Image (spheres, helix red, strand yellow):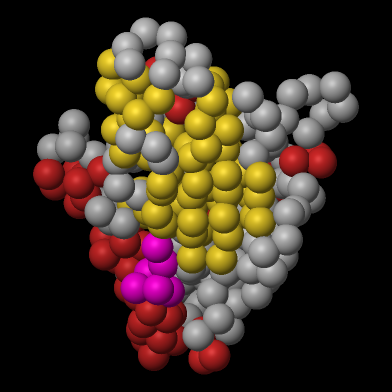
Amino acid sequence: MKKKLSMLVAAFLAPSIAFGYPNGTPNYVTDAAPFCASCHSAVKAEYMPELPAAVAAKETPDNKHYGLIRLPSQPSPYIELTDEQKEKLINAAKTIDSNSTVTITAPQKARPGEEIKVTVKVKGGNGPVICVMLVDKPLRFQSRPVSSSGWMITGEPDVRGQDGKVQTLWLDRRAKDLQRNLNYVAIENQRFDMDKNIYPEGTVTYTLKAPNRPGVYSVTAAFLYGTENTDRAGFFQRPSGRILFSNEVGVRVE
């Protein structure tokens, strides 16, 4: 009876949990920071300078993702695959990573209270959804939404996918009458064909109101994407997602 109950609970939870990458987070339409994606691998150990080097290394794809793929027993969710299939999966993920980029552009200066545009461009992942966060620092576990340092996102982000057209699919899921000036957005309906070198792409433009106090304020973009697709309910156990940060931009407010 206990085993049957556990199976029922797993079956109930799996469909909602499995909406993690590659399908994004359709129900989490709110501000966010990269720590929330705890199952994702961090592209670089340098994103975690506060951790001991050995601990930070465990969060990178080589250990967190590929190490679990090659693990021959539980708790690996890959044990149904042959060694050949495992290596093929790893090679595909490495190719996706090598074709994934994120850049950010912002003015060098702003007056207190002035509105500026910050544009984030992303490419990569395997779709069909990729996500962008506007944060303060390129830190895996300690970055915060950009508003934490005094910036204000004054309107809903301008979100465009591969076709260059504005899309509001994800923002439209926001509850009625709630503001849509979020730091976190999903870009949906992204095509992916590695053989044809087709990867998801998107541009997100934020309108920010500068802090009132003079100083240099940092702005960074976090890019969240997937490297695997599967129809298995246990997919949520796979740390195949990625967190990739842009360079850190400093805007002088004076």
Q: Position of residue 202 (x, y in %)?
A: 58, 60
- Left or right of residue 85: residue 142: left
Pick whichever, 146 or 57, lies toward us: 146
User: Where's the C terminus, which quadrant?
Assistant: top left
**Residue name at image x 48 percent, y 49 percent:** 120
Pick whichever, 27 or 155, lies toward us: 155
- Left or right of residue 61: residue 45: left
Pick whichever, 205 or 88, lies toward us: 205
Q: Position of residue 95 (x, y in %)?
A: 38, 79
Residue farthest to the top, as pictured: 213
The reply to whether residue 248 is visible in this rendering is yes
The segment highlighted magenta reads 96-101
Pick whichever, 221 or 212, lies toward us: 212
- Left or right of residue 102: residue 192: right
Q: Position of residue 128 (x, y in %)?
A: 65, 66
Question: Relative to 80, is 165 above or below?
Answer: above
Q: Position of residue 106 (x, y in %)?
A: 41, 40
